[in-house]
Image (cartoon, helix red, strand yellow):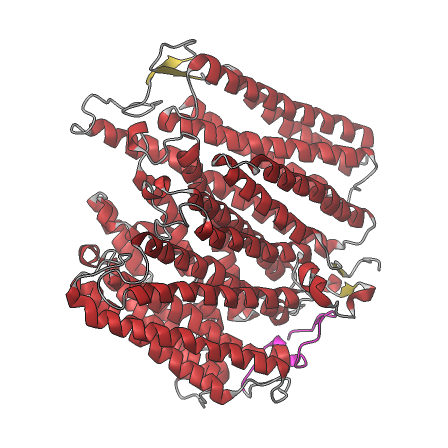
Amino acid sequence: MSGDHGTYYLPDPTKWPVITSMGLFLLALGFTLNIHSVAPGPWVMLVGALVIVVMMFSWFGQVAGESEAGRYGHQVDTSFRMGMGWFIFSEVMFFAAFFGALFYARIFSVPWLAGDEVLWPGYEGGWPTAGPTGANYIGPDAHEPAAGQFSSIGALGVPLLNTVLLLASSVTVTIAHWALKAQQRGRLAFWLLVSVVLGFAFLYFQVGEYMEAYQHLGLTLGSGVYGATFFMLTGFHGFHVTVGAITLTVILVRCLRGHFSPDNHFGFEGAAWYWHFVDTVWVGLFIFVYIL
Amino acid sequence: MSEEITAVADHHHDDIPKGLSRWLFTTNHKDIGTLYLWFSFMMFIIGGAMALVIRAELFQPGLQLVNPHFFNQMTTVHALVMIFGAVMPGFVGFANWLVPLMIGAPDMALPRMNNWSFWLLPFAGMLLIGSLFVPGGGPAAGWTIYPPLSIQTGMGMDLTIFAIHILGMSSILGSINIIATILNMRAPGMTLMKMPLFVWTWMITAFLLLAAMPVLAGAVTMLLTDRHFGTHFFDAAGGGDPLMFQHIFWFFGHPEVYILILPAFGMISAIIPTFARKPLFGYTSMVFATASIAFLSFIVWAHHMYTVGMPLSGELFFMYATMLIAIPTGVKIFNWLATMWRGSMTFETPMLYAISAVALFTVGGLTGVMMAITPADFQYHDTYFIVAHFHYVIFCGSVLSMFGAVYFWLPKWTGHMYNETLGKWHFWLTVIAFNVTFFPQHFLGFAGMPRRIPDYAQQFTEFNMVSSIGAFVLGFSQILLLINVVRTIKAGQPASDQVWEGAEGLEWTLPSPTPYHTFVTPPKVS
């Protein structure tokens, strides 16, 4: 039945949610088995991940198809927008937990430990630090530190470049959005492609930075509270960039197939919102993780 | 939005799907609500059985039935199952059933996602309860899973961490759906300040969930990496701090407490006016009180940690902020009392539950104020006093309200009246047994009996025996609820459309039982 203007589309029963839940269950179970080196762990994880990938193609494909078939009225569009907005809010709170950990360590736990004269009398604190028993920090970008030392990644090299890349990609996504609204499909595809390329370029440099940290700077996930907050914050951000860049790629493919119209393009906007969110988190990271 | 709110159902929507696939694949808010409620009841029974293991062991001093490690698993999993498996899904079940009916919407805003929010739960439940059967057993660090203890336990803790992640996803998706439904799907004329209070309280609860659950996800993720991937978030040797976990955990944990109670306030606000045959006293103040409680819930978390050695200024701030909560909560209690004042009251089972919920929640609220006083809390901290306190709040505030709500709305859902005599038996047995179980625990706590310990000094024996006997009566009384609900669904006197003489609101204008699809054409609200 058509979703004429003035109707709220109620979907038919669907098998994908329960299948997705099963996939997540397998992923979680497999991961746990993996951690504890129980034999079928990786296979269980793989099956779980495949289930989720298949679901994404099918479920999201179905929604895209329904949208293009004109089944969603204005009100459904509003539901989607609210859903995406509040989802991003929950993501902000997820990052807030890790930023909270960073601030707590810098403002409370490290100074408290440095002030403690009983347990670790020689510990002076400061930031970055790997804690009283961890490696000593020897300043940024100091290559090949000796055993028991670690370095960090200076803000002005790759991180600054990555900041420029991500900020630029936010601008190009917006230009693509203007083009979509102005019915300029060529410009839309071009600027969206530029955004996707910028996103993946960011990831390329981020991976290079991680390799540099592990191989040449002595900075790992185990480098005390600095290493933990550095890698978890940038790592979860990087994961979100990956998701965002893949999403934008899907949106690009949809654009090339002629999807979206000036009035009906929630898929595009949802992806763009997510991209701006990822961008904003990066600005926070650049300031609080790299510069300060 | 008004001109475009008419709903269109797909052509085969008119027949209700049959068999197992109906329940697995449903996108209907009533089916999903039913699934949530049965899941919640099942978890309530499983969690209750764990509580009975605890109380059986504590019947006398010494170690009788279970070893201490298993006892710790029971206290931990009992709490997690009850909070994340019984109470929260129970409330979401009511939200699914009632929010669309109360605001005149054809369904929830995002029906497929609604199915997903539910079907995440059984799988998360399998991980959580399954953790009891892996080598090393289930989580045994208490439901608050504080490091360093939670860093040291086995595979069961990892399964619990992932279960919490998936439960959190379910709550977040459910909350998004509820907010979108309330903000976007209201019938023409149903302005925000005309919404039933249950809808208001759920909207605010959904906001709390969206803000709190991701923080818990972050906290348990840090636990996971500290356990297996070499991070030092909670390890002082690496510059971290085990206390940091407590701060992050309780930043989630305190809003969580209000997540567990606010929808119950909405239920009470529906039941009491109906049986007092008077409109709710102070509707606007109820809305603002709910919002104030929600706001305050984010700035009081450290009252769970008075004894960890916080700076004095911190202890003072959290003490005063916590006490402030008594004001909006008091507003609510007085509004309910004023609603009953000079009402033509009758005392059917839902009303009995609502009144007892108000009275006994107040007991829990007052012990809460006692513990908000920092110096006094040093005496009560981690004793049976806190156990008594939060059972008065969560069992009496949330669970009794939900029982009342089941009896209240079941006739509307099934088209049959429940058995009033059986309902009253269930009520009196539950409320008396509850008090027999938990009131003595106040005294135990004052006398210094610590919580989460399988053995105790001999002077605590009598109160523990009384408490254990009460617990078994309380547990087995719930069979009456099951019998009554099943009998109501299968048979029972037909219920009228309005069901209750004093019932007001859109859901009572519908036929009983409610058709599979309702408000396909939105009602006009004047």
- Which picture quadrant has residue B38? bottom right
Could you tell me which residue is drawn at 80 percent across and 42 percent down? A261
Could you tell me which residue is drawn at 40 percent across and 38 percent down? A100
* B501 with respect to B49 (left or right): right
- Which picture quadrant has residue A130? top left
The residues colored magenta run B502-525
Image coords of residue B222 (percent x, y): 42, 38
B163, B326: nearer the viewer: B163
**Considering only vertical position in the picture, is B448 above or below B173?**
below
Could you tell me which residue is drawn at 70 percent across and 30 percent down? A175
Q: Is residue B198 visible in this depiction of the protein?
A: yes
B241, B508: nearer the viewer: B241
**Residue B511 within the segment the image draws in magenta:** yes
Image coords of residue B454 (percent x, y): 27, 58
Q: Is residue B339 visible in this depiction of the protein?
A: no
Image coords of residue A59 (percent x, y): 72, 47
Image coords of residue A129 (percent x, y): 33, 23
**Considering only vertical position in the picture, is B10 above or below B341?**
above
Majority secondary structure in the magenta region: loop
Could you tell me which residue is drawn at 46 percent across and 12 percent down? A216
